[in-house]
Amino acid sequence: MEQRIIDLQLDRLRDKILLLGGATEAALNRSMEALVNRDSTLAQRVLDDDKIINEMELEIDRMSIEILALQQPAAHDLRFVMSVAKITPILERIADHAGNIAEAALIVNNEPQLKNYVDFPIMAQTAADMLRAALDAFTNEDSATSREVIKRDKEIDISYHRVFNELLEMMIENPSATTGAAHLLFVAKHLERIGDYVKDICELNVYLREAVFIKHSPGT
Amino acid sequence: MEGKISITNLDFFYGKAQALYDITLQIPEHEVVAFIGPSGCGKSTFLRTLNRMNDTIPIAKVSGTVEIDGRDIYSPGTDVVALRRKVGMVFQKSNPFPKSIFDNVAYGIRINGIHSSRSDLSERVEKALMDAALWDEVKDRLNASAFGLSGGQQQRLCIARALAVQPDVILMDEPASALDPIATQKIEELVVELKRQYTIVIVTHNMQQAARVSDRTAFFMLGKLIEYNPTQKMFTNPNEKLTEDYITGRFG
């Protein structure tokens, strides 16, 4: 089959969004590492790198618009460009949440260390695993895996409620820990939101592959 | 789906060469149906079977049925002139008669004796020109030669001429392929407007045009109907790989 002009542009778009996905994944992993290991240098790096992620988002926007305007894609090509255009801001939002976690880390790292929290790393690991699986599923156009990842969002929600209660108890027992614990509450919320965003990516993966919208359709 | 036009198991031959294979499809009333496909796929041949324009080709042979409003147009005793009045046609190249703008539109009305008086004739011509979105541009020069009009205007004049005899169906064979983008846009807007009153079948090489104006699209290849679906479905998620390959430019 002959190479079309659009193929080259779609390949470039695919490369760009995979780079953005990789950068987002790295931001999330580093922000949690910065928090758990009390590594403020790493937290600052996450914040500094956010600019690069924002630029990547703009670049992908420009490329998507150009392909739509100049190549007028149809069928799978169209679904691919639409999916990329919709996944890109989701990734950027995930990276923003990673930035917020990094900001929290910078504050919490200056506070006395709170007791070790078991559920936090589990929750973060679940979010990171889901994100990686969602990006792999996008690359492979694997809607079956995407549907599995969507189901895992519940795991994060359960962890969130557990962490929430854990931190609440900590604040009641030890009022001097309130500032740190309050920031950690926000971190938990960021992770919970990331789970929701990963779910959105997976829904778009299903659209890309199957041309069906499963968003707002419970049980799909 | 109930069809204004209902085609069943249609085969078409030019002598021994088969040009259409077992075509079955329904064209609903007040919809625009686009036929797309590579050159030589049979889409124009198929269009011309819908008002028996192929009758003029001596070696042409048709089997199967084409029903319009439930009546097979190939049954013996069909009044072909009446059929072509009911199923009007607009061609790729505008073909106005060497007459005035008025007389071009009045021609079909006169030979069919549709009008009741001179003023009725004028009213019918005016209505046809208005329906073809040409009235405002020609109302002050109805007696001028049709050849003085631009290409796009000539094409709309031909559409007015087809509309003047009050057809139910309008067949359009690449009606905008020889026009500039502005004239093309006017024809496309007209097609969308006209479907409120007529059923329209349009053959086009321009896939974006099919996407813009039609409710349903039929994709033909090598004389076969590969896929027929709502246009939105065809251009976002076609059922057939051949359709996908064609509309995404992988061949053609």
Image (spheres, rainbow, N blue to C red):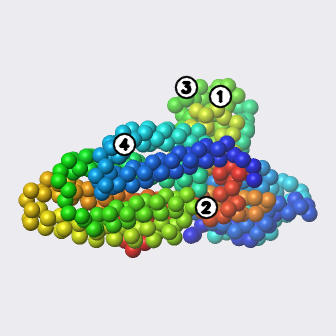
Q: Nearer the viewer, mark 2 or mark 4?
A: 4
Q: Which is more N-terminal, label 3 or label 1?
A: 3
Nearest the eye: A68 or A111: A111
Residue ID at (82%, 60%): B19
Q: Which is more N-terminal, label 1 or label 2?
A: 1
For label 4, the crowd category at 10 Å Cα-Cα, with few meaning under 14, some 14 to 19 and many 20 or more, is: some
Q: Which mark is residue B186?
A: none
Q: Note whether B35 is above or below B176 in the view shown.
A: below
> Do labels 4 and 3 touch, CB within 8 Å?
no
Nearest the eye: B154 or B238: B238
Query: Callout 1: residue from which chain?
Result: B
Q: Note whether A10 is above or below B240 in the view shown.
A: above
Query: Callout 4: residue from which chain?
Result: A
Q: Which is more N-terminal, label 2 or label 3?
A: 3
Q: Which residue is mark 2?
A: B238
Q: Secondary structure at mark 1?
A: loop
Q: Nearer the viewer, mark 4 or mark 3?
A: 4
Q: Nearer the viewer, mark 2 or mark 1?
A: 2
Q: Which residue is mark 4?
A: A45
Nearest the eye: B35 or A120: A120
Q: Which residue is mark 3?
A: B140
Q: Give the CA separation, mark 3 to mark 2.
A: 48 Å
Instruction: Check disc 3 and give the amino acid type.
Output: Asp
Residue A90: where, in percent of width, then height?
40, 52
Q: Nearer the viewer, mark 1 or mark 4?
A: 4
> Do labels 2 and 1 touch, CB within 8 Å?
no
Q: Give the CA separation, mark 1 to mark 3.
A: 16 Å
